[in-house]
């Protein structure tokens, strides 16, 4: 009978409809899974790297430069350096000597944060500078522009504050400097005496009195460059 002939066509059409429905269901399920799944390990690591690289801008300056920083005293025990002030400016070119500024610019410097501290005895000033680079490779490249033997030049420019004990902290006063690197950050220091004596007028160099500068700089660098994995339960993270 002619009425029986359309049946195979109907079967094929029905089968195709079912296959399409199943395919759509699988695709929908996959899309739903993609939207609802948690972040992968690779995504978490990528998020951690992004968070670390943005700390110099995202963190309050008081977190980067605490009001006091602990260090080991020459005579033993622990002392604290006190923060005098933080610069509101982040210019790479104006924060370091000209020779170093050229190297920072070539390596892609994003900004420099500076703060000045005074030691517990009130005789030594230290400016700490956090240099933010695009990545670790850029930071390593820029590090070579700074003296690694304790000389203050080329290096960080001191940060003076009018009306404070740091008002005479000029480039001529610098007697010691340091540079440290971790991840996309450099942390620089430049140090001199509170009395404002130019370095070339000092009869006897006393490098030991400036040693604490490196210690407090390493404290700043450690806090700034230590990675931490995202916590999707915390409000500060979006997973």
Image (cartoon, rainbow, N blue to C red):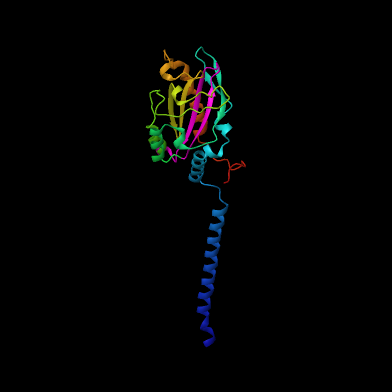
- Residue 53 forms part of the magenta stretch: no
Residue 117 on image: x %, y %: 54, 24
Q: Quadrant of residue 179?
A: top left
- Residue 127 forms part of the magenta stretch: yes
Residue 51 on image: x %, y %: 52, 41
Q: Is residue 149 above or below residue 106?
A: above
Residue in the foreground of this view, choosing between 168 and 226: 168
Whether residue 1 is visible: no
Query: Mainly helix, strand or loop, the magenta region?
Result: strand
What residue appears at the point 55 percent right and 39 percent down from the top-left corner? 58
Q: Is residue 198 above or below residue 146?
A: above
Residue 106 on image: x %, y %: 38, 40
What residue appears at the point 54 percent right and 73 percent down from the top-left corner? 14
Residue in the foreground of this view, choosing between 53 and 235: 53
Bounds of the magenta span?
110-137
Q: Quadrant of residue 205?
A: top left
Taking the image as shown, residue 34 lies to the left or right of residue 143, namely right
Residue in the foreground of this view, choosing between 88 and 197: 197
Residue in the foreground of this view, choosing between 41 and 223: 223
Question: What is the total number of numbered labels drawn onto the structure image?
Answer: 0
Residue 73 on image: x %, y %: 52, 15
Q: Is residue 178 above or below residue 236?
A: above
Q: Is residue 14 above or below residue 79?
A: below
Whether residue 124 is visible: yes
């Amino acid at each position: 009978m002619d009425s029986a002939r359309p049946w195979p066509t109907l079967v094929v059409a029905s089968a195709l409809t079912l296959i399409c429905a199943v395919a759509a269901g699988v695709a929908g399920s996959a899309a739903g899974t993609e939207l609802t799944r948690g972040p992968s390990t690779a995504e978490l690591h990528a998020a951690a790297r992004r968070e670390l690289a943005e700390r110099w801008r995202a963190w309050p300056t008081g977190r980067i430069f605490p009001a006091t920083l602990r260090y080991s005293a020459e005579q033993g025990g622990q002392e604290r350096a006190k923060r005098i002030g933080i610069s509101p400016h982040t210019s790479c070119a104006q924060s370091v000597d000209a020779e170093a500024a050229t190297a920072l610019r070539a390596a892609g410097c994003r900004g420099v944060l500076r703060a000045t501290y005074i030691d517990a005895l009130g005789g030594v000033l230290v400016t700490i500078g956090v240099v933010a680079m695009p990545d670790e490779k850029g930071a390593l490249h820029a590090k070579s522009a700074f003296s690694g033997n304790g000389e203050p030049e080329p290096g960080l420019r001191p940060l003076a504050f009018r009306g404070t004990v740091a008002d005479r902290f000029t480039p001529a006063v610098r007697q010691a400097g340091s540079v440290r690197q971790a991840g996309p950050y450099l942390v620089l220091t430049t140090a001199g005496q509170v009395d404002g004596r130019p370095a070339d007028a000092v009869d006897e160099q006393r490098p030991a009195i400036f040693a604490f500068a490196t210690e407090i700089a390493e404290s700043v660098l450690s806090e700034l460059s230590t990675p931490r994995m995202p916590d999707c339960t915390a409000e500060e993270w979006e997973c």
